[in-house]
Image (cartoon, helix red, strand yellow):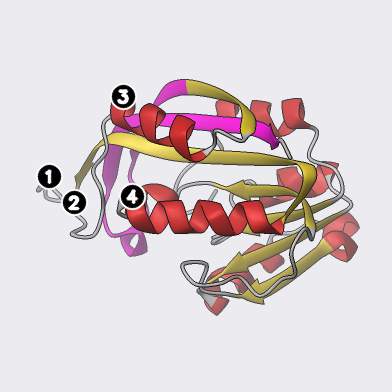
Amino acid sequence: MSKWGIEEKETLDAITKMNMQGTILNIAAGDGRFNNSLLEYADKVIAVDKSASELEILKSICPQHLNNKLETQVVDVTKKIPFADSTFDGIFCTGFLHLFKKEIIANMITEMKRLLKNGGSIILDFATDIKRLDKDKNPVLFSEEGNYTTKEAITFFKEQLADFDIDIQVSTFREENLEDDAGYKFITGSFLVISGSLKR
């Protein structure tokens, strides 16, 4: 299991529904949560993350029969992502975008659109109404985080992804006894699973 918790069924269902074939960019792939599920569908997955050590964990849990479809690269995805326009058939990004203010998220979405081919698919998840506690049950707050409500996030993504045919599903989550390097022990909230295809 990832240090960030389990693979939520709703996100796995979106991977199946969107049939993420071709070359997929897994943004902020971390220690590999969902990456092996993407590899089962894709012809190739390029997993990028700012942390080389996280990508090493991701590679270590990749089944041998999927290894030839995996490529990893250390990338800071808050900056320009070093791939050419229209490179990818799909983009996947979970557990990450909610950590930023709206203007940074909007810039990252613009970059995702640049990287997608005509009709390319996207799957994002976005946590809302978050409550985190440390091992002593004290609240854990991230200063740069937007701390979004579900309603606010839905409105924002409908605006940002107006050029996509999108579906937004809302679910709840609860994770306990997370690893120490997650920065907290307990988290609860809601999350959006946003999936769709780019209209050109």
x then y, percent, for residue 50? 51, 73
- Tell me the tag on residue 137: 1
Residue type highlighted by circle 3: Lys
Q: Label 3 crowding class (10 Å Cα cut-off): few <14, some 14-19, many 20+?
A: few
Residue type highlighted by circle 2: Asp
Quickly name the residue at label 3. Answer: 151
Looking at the rendering, which quadrant does residue 85 occupy? bottom right
- Report the quarter where the C terminus lies: top right
Kindly report the distance in space between the C-alpha atoms of the residues bearing marks 4 and 1. Answer: 29 Å
Quickly name the residue at label 4. Answer: 102
- Tell me the tag on residue 134: 2
Q: Nearer the viewer, mark 3 or mark 2?
A: 3
x then y, percent, for residue 90? 74, 47
Q: Is residue 191 magenta?
A: yes
**Residue shown at 86% from the left, 56% from the top:** 66
Q: Nearer the viewer, mark 4 or mark 1?
A: 4
Kindly report the distance in space between the C-alpha atoms of the residues bearing marks 2 and 1. Answer: 5 Å
Q: Nearer the viewer, mark 3 or mark 1?
A: 3
Kindly report the distance in space between the C-alpha atoms of the residues bearing marks 4 and 2. Answer: 26 Å
